[in-house]
Image (cartoon, rainbow, N blue to C red):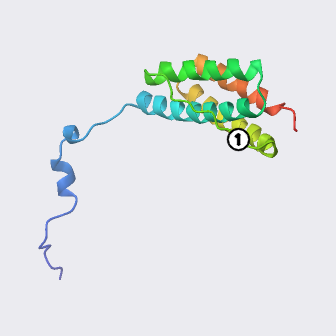
Amino acid sequence: MYEPIRTKSVHSTVARTSSSDFPHRSREEELDIQLAGHLAALLAVTDELRALEPSDELDVAAERLAGQLTRLRGASPSRALSAAASTSRLDALHQRAHALAGRALVVAASRADTAAAILSAERMDAHAVAPVA
């Protein structure tokens, strides 16, 4: 009634491969990478805001973000100031920074990184009440 299977099962090859055939990262390593990515994006937006509206508060925030990135990545982040931004983008930059800080806060909270979580929450607050030009 049924014909026998004449080809090898595609599922049999999975069972034969060992888990050491390719590198694996732990959940903590993945969260570190994700958090570093969010903080790097937030640093880039912060640097762009600093170019548009220089302030001591943004300077301190940028240095703290760079410090957290150095801690997570083991090397200081490369930074470039963007002079191409216009003042009409100021509000959009604050909104983007707020969203990036929120993402960083979620990841920092899930990995129980108190220092990064506090910094992210502070940046969210700063960009939520940022003056609109």
Residue at 45 percent of width and 25 percent of height: 73
Above or below: residue 15 compared with residue 63: below
In this rendering, position of residue 10 left or right of residue 120: left
Q: Residue at x 62, y 19 (%)?
A: 63
In the depicted view, which residue is nearer to us: 46 or 98? 46
Quadrant in the rendering for residue 62 = top right
Q: Residues within 10 Å of mark 1 (few under 14, many from 20)?
A: some
| Residue at the limit of the structure toward the front, as seen here | 83
Furthest-bottom residue in view? 1
Q: Nearer the viewer, residue 81 or 58?
A: 81
- Horizontally, residue 1 falls left or right of residue 124, namely left
Whether residue 112 can be seen here: no
Q: Is residue 130 left or right of residue 11?
A: right
The quadrant of the image that shows the N terminus is bottom left
Whole-percent x, y for residue 97 in the image: 70, 36
Which amino acid is tagged 1? Arg
The reply, left or right, for residue 1 in relation to residue 76 is: left
Q: Secondary structure at mark 1?
A: helix
Please state, as top left, top right, bottom left or bottom right, where the C terminus lies in the image. Answer: top right
Q: Position of residue 112 (x, y in %)?
A: 55, 21
Is 4 situated above or below 93?
below
| One can see residue 33 in this view | yes
Count up the numbered dots. Answer: 1
Task: Name the one closer to the observer, 5 or 68.
Answer: 68
**Residue 126 in picture, x, y percent from top left:** 78, 26
| Residue named by callout 1 | 96
Q: Residue 43 at what x, y percent from top left?
A: 62, 30
Q: Quadrant of residue 10?
A: bottom left
